[in-house]
Image (cartoon, grey):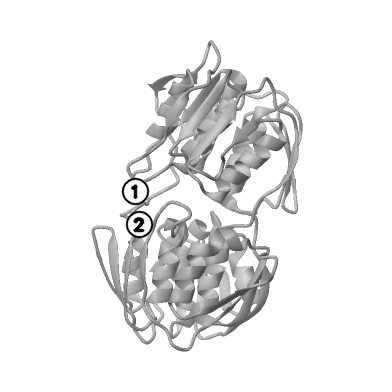
Amino acid sequence: MDKLIVHGGATLRGSINISGSKNASLPILAASLLTAEPCIIRRVPDVSDTNYMIQIISALGADVERSSGTVRIACEEISDVAPYELVRRMRASICVMGPLLARKGRAVVSLPGGCVIGDRPVDLHLRGLEALGAKVEFEGGNIILTATDGLHGAEIDLRGTHGPTVLGTDNVMMAATLADGVTIIESAAAEPEVLDLANFLNAMGAKIQGAGTRRIVIEGVKALHGVEHTVIPDRIEAGTFMAAAALAGEGVTLRRVCREHLKAITAAIEHSGHRVEFNAAGDSCTIFRGEILQGADLVTAPYPGYPTDMQAQMTALLATTAGISVIKDTIFPQRFMHCAELKRMGADIKVDHGTAVVRGVAQLSAAPVMASDLRASAALVLAALTAKGSTEISRLYHIDRGYEHIDEKLLMLGADVQRVKER
């Protein structure tokens, strides 16, 4: 396994390109199963999660070629059984259920793994697919879905305990594209990644309206065709580097971003006293570290609210921001495992019932720390950038799930980091 050594104190400057969205790429790759014709998908990030999804699609029988961020997929003949040894590695693999069910009338998918930030049930996915006419059975750790009479349009409410389900919306939307009749999804997830999937599906010949809002209407069609598509920028990677620039930067420019997708993150960073300047097109921004800083109160919420996937990174930024900050995660209240590791570095954080109270300290100090999930690992890297000494971050495979060559991008900005093999 790899670990990252971050030597604190370097000043970040210069510019980097933000990669394509990991969370948009995964369902879009899965959606290629809906057609026998070739699909070409560009700006797919080279991260372990997308690699797993490509392996799953290949194992289902697809012909896949990958080169420099472009993936070509042809699914002429596919199986309806997703292999356990691949599915177990990544929760997002569950989004092959909808396409397989729609295309084959049957889907066998293992209950997925790949996440330690609390219970993330698939009951909403299954409820939506059942409403379309699927029969759901469980056997040997597998979910078995069958639709012997085909899928039929329905009205479905996907409201969950902690808000809309993104992958659940994706799954139902993909299945409904080939269903007979009209499907209406109420309480749909409105994230940009859902809209990007809908744009991909519509380019394939689907008839979807309302994606990006809480109500999506899908008119089923007989068949979908191949398409070429470019994935949207990764707003969480962009937000992570915005936080890095605010912590340790001197005018860092991020290219290939989308200003509209970054409104909540930008507002939080600006509220803390830093400056973010976008170009006229909104696809590039420069972050300037502020001189007079203050704490912030943040509450995570479904899009367009502040994203739970940026909670840990903002905690790292606020750990050395003067004043008291309060961060409440309403989506995943257990998602504060990074706080214990930040405290090992000298942070003053108290966590109770899904809320972290952060009292800013002047500086953190290096310590051996361990990543527990994808975004927690990013928070530890950010904290290490300004910590006194050299911080060793182990279990780097967590960060490789969702950040494309993060160490190389940090080096381009002037950070002093090394990726080394753990003994």
Q: Which residue is mark 1?
A: 118
Q: Which residue is mark 2?
A: 335
Please tell me which residue is depicted at 37% across the width and 87% down the height of the picture: 362
The amino acid pointed to by label 1 is: Gly
Front-most of residues 327 and 43: 327
The amino acid pointed to by label 2 is: Arg
Q: Which quadrant of the structure image shows residue 96? A: top right
Instruction: Find residue 221 and report its horizontal and vertical position in percent.
Output: 66, 23
Disc 1 is placed on an element classified as loop
Please tell me which residue is depicted at 44% across the width and 32% down the height of the picture: 125
Instruction: Find residue 7 and report its horizontal and vertical position in percent.
Output: 51, 81
Front-most of residues 104 and 178: 178
Dot 1: few (<14), some (14–19), or many (≥20) neighbours within 10 Å?
few
Q: Is residue 50 above or below residue 173?
A: below
Q: Is residue 51 above or below residue 359?
A: above
Instruction: Find residue 13 and report its horizontal and vertical position in percent.
Output: 63, 81
Disc 2 is placed on an element classified as loop
Please tell me which residue is depicted at 74% across the width and 29% down the height of the picture: 225
